[in-house]
């Protein structure tokens, strides 16, 4: 399992071009082993959305396990 930094997580979910090919490959190589984000990253994203500094498209098929 790898833990994604907040920016990397947001860029990966959003399929952003800011995510480098090497970073994208590392994530893809670890999907089977599990990807994680910290609780504080979830809070950061929630606050960014709340303050209008981040807008995320809703994407189906995302599975969240706790």
Image (cartoon, rainbow, N blue to C red):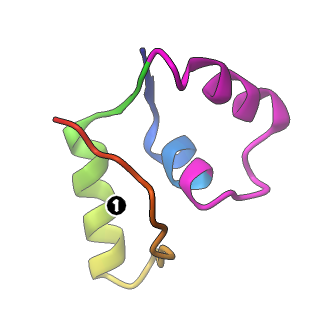
- Closer-to-camera residue (35/54): 35
Q: Nearer the viewer, residue 63 or 17?
A: 63
Residue under the point 80% across and 27% down: 22
**Residue most extreme to the bottom:** 52
- In the structure shown, which secondary structural element does the residue marked by tag 1 occupy? helix
- Identified at 31% across, 82% down, the residue is 51
Figure quadrant of the N terminus: top left
Question: Quarter of the image holding residue 24?
Answer: top right
**Quadrant of res 65:** top left
- When the figure is inspected, residue 25 is found, relative to residue 50, above or below; the finding is above
Q: Is residue 60 above or below residue 26?
A: below
Vertical side of 35 occupied by 61: above or below = below
Label tally = 1
The residue that appears at 55% across and 54% down in the rendered structure is 13
Q: Which residues are magenta?
A: 12-33
> Against 22, is 40 above or below?
below
Q: Position of residue 39 (x, y in %)?
A: 20, 40
- Mark 1 crowd level (few <14, some 14–19, many ≥20, 10 Å Cα): some
Query: In the orientation shown, which residue stands out farthest toward the front?
Result: 61
Q: Is residue 17 magenta?
A: yes
Q: Residue furthest left?
A: 66
Residue drawn at (52%, 48%) of the image: 7
Residue 25 x %, y %: 75, 27
**Circle 1 residue:** 45
* Residue located farthest toward the right when viewing the structure as drawn: 21
Position of residue 15 in the picture relative to residue 3 (left or right): right
Q: Nearer the viewer, residue 10 or 44?
A: 10
Location of residue 17 in the rendering, given as x and y in whole percent from the top left corner: 79, 56
Quadrant where the C terminus lies? top left
């Amino acid at each position: 399992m790898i833990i994604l930094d907040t920016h990397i997580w947001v860029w990966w979910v959003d399929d952003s071009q800011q995510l480098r090919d090497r970073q994208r490959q590392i994530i893809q190589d670890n999907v089977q082993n599990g990807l994680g984000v910290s609780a504080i990253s979830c809070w950061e994203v929630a606050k960014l959305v709340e303050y209008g500094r981040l807008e995320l498209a809703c994407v189906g098929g995302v599975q969240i396990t706790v």
